[in-house]
Image (spheres, helix red, strand yellow):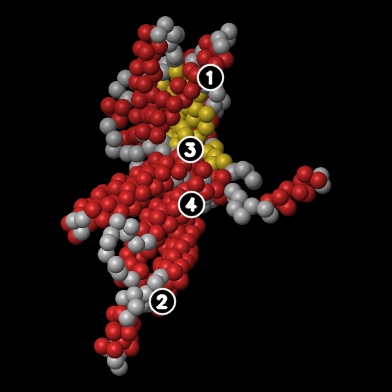
Amino acid sequence: MSDTAASEPRARWFFFTRPNEVEIENKYTEAALERHKREGLELAVRARWIAMGLTGLLLIFLNPHWEVLWYHFILLLICANGWMIRRAGRVGQSRTELLLIFVDLLIMTLGMIIPNPFSDDVRPLAMQFRFDNFQYFFVILAAGTMAYSWRTVIAIGTWTAIIWTTGWVIAWWVAVPIPGISEKVAEALQGYPDVAEMLDPNSFRSSIRIQQVIVFLMVAVTLGVSMRRLNHLLMTNAGLERERANLSRYFSPNVVEELSQNDDPLKQVRKENVAVLFIDIVGFTKYAAGRDPYDVIEVLRGFHARMEAEVFRHHGTLDKYLGDGLMATFGTPVTTPLDATNAVSCARGMVTVIDRWNIERRRAGEPEIRVGIGVHYGSVVLGDIGANRLEFAVIGDAVNVAAKLEAMTRELQARIVLSDAVRLQLEQEGSSASELTAEFTENKGHPVRGVEYPMDIWVM
């Protein structure tokens, strides 16, 4: 083992947090969380500005004197700091954001403890703690949950406890009691020491201060645990959505929905009667010869995107891409009462889409795209194949016959070739077979290369 490889685990010891496999796989979820957090912070800042504005008006109503400007100054600092938190906010750990939150708590604490320098009112410093201002810290704690980080919530709880406790202890230490008040209160309330302490203007009521901090820490820990569980739930749901996204690469949305609610594994091998469709670009090798490879790839991307959309629109399953073509099945992994109908409708829809695309190509001076489509209905074997990398496979004579019918479109100069089995299944499904095959002509007993007996086919 090299020194670099040996030192890598030891180097990781110096980090408190590091991205794990789940975090890497859920980078798109984190991007979504980032977007939602920024929206939440935007709302929080606007709500803060509105609340501070209303509070400022209320203070003027309650105390219509110049000394109220001190509290307006505190409100402005809180508004400005909220704007900076919005700018620095992001999902996960942000030192700048945490520092600004610390400043938020410090501003609130100082505003509640320091006496108003513009006020001539002489009152004991302990009276600053009689206005129940500590409850506003719960607003900051609730806003911290918008960070989608349990660490942030715990940090707010811890810092508030430390800052608030330090603040009132220092205030108690430096406070100069007004002489005589405590004695007069105690004398007036002899025999009621608890009431005397409650009404004593010089008393800091240490038990109440400690109770506030303990209750706040309990709420912070509870919210932090809830946020951690919420994050775990979000990441778990992200994994489920990723699995659904992987399924959507192969199956139409309605099939993905059915698979997500089905407990039976796909790897159970079974036989089913399904419709199989092959489509291919006619003369693509000649078209690609001498052209820029990037242009060729762009044409294939445009072709595949349009054809894939038709497959999914008609409730089909995209089995695989085949270079300049693709294979689709209808009735996999779960059969439906309209599999043949969906397959034929899809084939006709593909032709319509190609015609519209060719109009755009002619206007751009590009050659038209011609396609051949073969559709057959019959028995197949389906299930997962592979060991480490699984692939949902559909195999059987129906697949081979559909591929042969698609190849026959060159020989017959046709756009779509259907087997008679498809026509019979259309009638059994109760669909309007005459409308779906209105432009088709029947060709009885036509030999098909690779098929032992001649087949009745329908040609468009």
Give the alpha-carbon distance from disc 3 to disc 4, as whole Å.
44 Å
- For badge 4, the amino acid type reads Leu
**CB under 8 Å between discs 4 and 1:** no
Q: Amino acid at mark 1?
A: Ile
> Which residue is identified by label 4?
98
Q: Which badge, 3 or 4, is on the more N-terminal residue?
A: 4
Outermost bottom residue: 191
Q: Amino acid at mark 3?
A: Tyr
Relative to 121, residue 2 above or below: above
N-terminal of the two: label 2 or label 4?
Answer: 4
* Label 1, label 2: how far apart the Cα atoms are: 76 Å
Q: Judge the density around disc 3: few (<14), some (14-19), many (≥20) Cα neighbours within 10 Å.
A: some
Q: Nearer the viewer, mark 4 or mark 1?
A: 4
User: Mark 2 highlights which residue?
Assistant: 206
Q: Nearer the viewer, mark 2 or mark 4?
A: 2
Q: Nearer the viewer, mark 1 or mark 3?
A: 1
Task: Name which of mark 2 and mark 3 comes first in the sequence.
Answer: 2
Instruction: Give residue 297's mark.
Output: 1
The foreground one among 19 and 222 is 222
Which residue is rendered at x = 44% and y = 65% of the image? 167
The residue positioned 39% from the left and 59% from the top of the image is 110
Q: Position of residue 394 (x, y in %)?
A: 52, 39
Residue type, numbered disc 2: Ser
Give me the residue at 32% from left, 25% from top: 437
Q: In the rendered view of the protein, which quadrant contains the C terminus? A: top left
Return the residue nearer the eye: 334 or 194.
194
Which of the marked residues, 1 or 2, is nearer the chain's N terminus? 2
Q: Reply above or below: 453 against 58.
A: above
Answer yes or no: is residue 230 visible. no
| Lower position in the chain sequence, tag 1 or tag 3 | 3
- Neighbor class of circle 4 (other Cα within 10 Å; few <14, some 14-19, many 20+) is some
Q: Is disc 1 surrounded by few (<14), some (14 to 19) or many (20+) residues within 10 Å?
A: few
